[in-house]
Image (cartoon, rainbow, N blue to C red):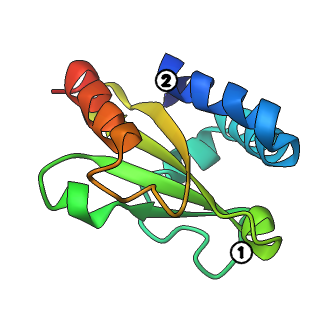
Amino acid sequence: MYSLIVHTDAEDDLEELWQTAEDVAAAISVLLDEIQGSQDLLDALTDHNFGEDQSADFHVSKVSKFWDAGKDIWRIKFWDLEQRGLRYRVIYAYERGKKRYYVLGILPRATAYDSNDPRIRRILRAYEDLIG
């Protein structure tokens, strides 16, 4: 069975969103809860381009710059938020041997892929600590 664990850093990101963008925090919280409760949705988190055609509430994709560097790091894009111009990404890692997902960060799209951003460096450190 798959499991989804929200890292304390991602919890902090979500808490910050509750203070600054409550509607974004609520949408992300609801969807993460929905995913946690569904083995089918959890399984979809490693299905590259799942939901690309908006057949699901979210779109899953490998983060290619990290994937190409040998890191099993993915992202979720939320269609509802995108349609309202609220571009956020949930960045997560997958630990294959344990079928475990770790939500490592929740970031605005503008910085979600910037290797120089301190939050991305934080995510990469957490990845190394958890999965190595």
**Number of numbered discs:** 2
Q: Which residue is mark 1?
A: 55
Instruction: Note whether 23 is above or below 1 in the view shown.
Output: below
Among the 4 quarters of the image, the one containing residue 13:
top right
Picture coordinates of residue 1, whole percent (x, y): 49, 28
Q: Is residue 40 left or right of residue 97?
A: right
Residue 39: x %, y % from top left? 61, 38
The x, y position of residue 15, in whole percent, is 70, 25
- Indicate which disc, 1 or 2, sits on the residue closer to the N terminus: 2
Marks 1 and 2, Cα distance to the nearest angstrom? 30 Å
Label 1: element kind:
loop
Q: Identity of the amino acid at label 2? A: Asp
Q: Nearer the viewer, residue 61 or 90?
A: 90
Identified at 27% across, 53% down, the residue is 115
Q: Which residue lies at the image location 41% right of the left edge and 66% below the top edge?
A: 48
Q: Is residue 58 visible?
A: yes
Residue 100 occupies quadrant = top left
Residue at horizontal 23 percent and vertical 55 percent from the top: 66
> Would you name the residue on which mark 2 appears?
9
Say left or right for 74 vs 44: left
- Amino acid type of the residue that numbered disc 1 sits on in the rendered structure: Ser
